[in-house]
Amino acid sequence: MDFFVRTESGQFVPVAEGYKDTGTQNPNATYAFGNGGLFNTPGLNPGIINAMILPELGLQAALPVTFTNQMQPLTPLFTGVTASTGSFSAAPCGDTKQVGLAKLCNITTKFGRMSLKTPTIDLTRVGQFTNRGYFSDFRLIGDPMNSTITNGATPTLPNGGISQAITSEVQKQMMQFRIGWAREFAKLIYAGNPVNNLGDGYKEFNGLDLLINTGYQDAETGVWCPAANSLLQSFSSQNFSTSGTAATNLVGLIQDMHRALVSIADRTGLSPVSFKIAMARDMFYELTKVWPIAYATTATTVIAGAQTNTQLQVNSMDAAQMRDSLRTGRFLMINGIQVPVVLDDAIAQTAIGGNVFESTIYFIPVTVLGNTPATYTEYFNFDGDGALQQASQVFGITGKYFTTDAGRYAFVRQNDNFCVSFLGVEMTRIRMDTPFLAARLTSVRYTAGLPTRSGFPGDATFYNGGKTSTVSAPSLYPPNVYSA
């Protein structure tokens, strides 16, 4: 039997059996309503109070986004000119030294590939209610879908918000998909590593832990390129929350690292450069406790200690006002410059115990020369010339495949008769064209007075609980069977 699909012009196009899948899908979704459905409990209050925390995808949402069809781009870095060779001559017209040669280092990066699918639902099961004792007039009190999850960092799907998910069977599946995507992708921004690849089906791009690093080499020859290396520093697991010396040292080190990066930008002709500093939310809160006094007294205490009858005074209210301005504005005052801070829940933290955590601070060059992107997200464009979207039109199966977010995400509708699901794929990478302007400060330890909850399952401070379905409705006697 031939199958047909209606085109946008209204014509029916034969697609034969290609539009239908192989018959291997079986329903595995947990439904919202009907027997066993999540909301299938009689007497539920219509107001459902949200207690779910979703991760704030700070850096992922802050980076510029662009697209390409180049799988292995080469970014050339002009690394310098070699030293002169030869010798000076004593004779006025004699031979002399010869100037050196220009050097170039080409760096590259590869796409990652991630795919997820929705549970398979039975379309004939959708819309069922057990009886009039069950309702769907729910309203959500509170909404965890923060802007970082709804601004394109995750696939845009029809009404994929949690508000619709509590009243619509299909939107429940869409909401689950978006949350799953946000959680799976977010941590790759920092920890992505191709050693975790699984064939061609799952690939990780180089995250910031690899991009902000030393050991850069030419992509074609393998020759070392130390001029491309990032600035790496370790704080040696000192706890700045419990040690005044560690706090003072940390503030001083952050300022020194920023100064070193700005110096490189100035002397490479890439200024003005804009940085973002990324760190964990709780770390920033604790750091702003010690920043005002340490910022005001770093180095001056050494000078004052060496002088007679010299005393330093810090106004506590001035320090409190600076602390509050840092928190509300989300920045650090560094060398007289307000440097924006990105709070990112995806940054790995090691729980030491006793509310002590250890993590990394990232210095990311976002733009150079004022507005030229230096670090950005780049995706393969499925809407590009000759790519998936056009290819699906050639094969007459446009109804089966579709893209969202300007070609960043591609989807296939999998259907076996009444069993349907969505499978999505993305090919993305982080491009850092100026790794020598980036830095990482590792092994920074702090004590959180009250750690905040995490939005990632598996983290030490992640909490959920509850159930994914309810017990089925009570069985009723059949109408035509009587037992005396």
Image (cartoon, helix red, strand yellow):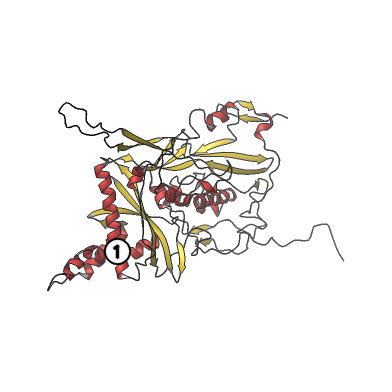
Say whether residue 139 is visible.
yes
The part of the image, by quadrant, that contains residue 341 is: bottom left
Q: What is the count of numbered marks?
A: 1
Quadrant the N terminus occupies: top right
Quadrant the C terminus occupies: bottom right
Pointer 1 residue: 249
Callout 1: few (<14), some (14-19), or many (20+) C-alpha neighbours within 10 Å?
some
Q: Residue furthest left?
A: 309
User: Would residue 380 be found to the left or right of residue 238 on screen?
Assistant: right
Q: Nearer the viewer, residue 421 or 109?
A: 109
**Residue at image point 20% right, 68% down:** 301
Residue 308, percent across and down? 12, 73
Q: Nearer the viewer, residue 75 or 409?
A: 75
Q: Residue furthest right?
A: 484
Residue 423, percent across and down? 58, 43
User: Would residue 101 be found to the left or right of residue 450 on screen?
Assistant: left
**Residue at image point 60% right, 58% down:** 135
Q: Nearer the viewer, residue 445 or 391?
A: 445
User: Would residue 419 be found to the left or right of residue 253 on screen?
Assistant: right
Amino acid type, residue under disc 1 in the picture:
Asn
Say whether residue 312 is visible.
no
Considering the numbered disc 1 on the image, is that residue within a helix, a strand or a loop? helix
The part of the image, by quadrant, that contains residue 220 is: top left
* In this view, 73 is above or below 9: below
**Residue at image point 69% right, 61% down:** 473
* In this view, 462 is above or below 149: below
Residue 294, percent across and down? 26, 65
Q: Residue furthest bottom?
A: 309
The part of the image, by quadrant, that contains residue 221 is: top left
Q: Nearer the viewer, residue 32 or 260?
A: 260
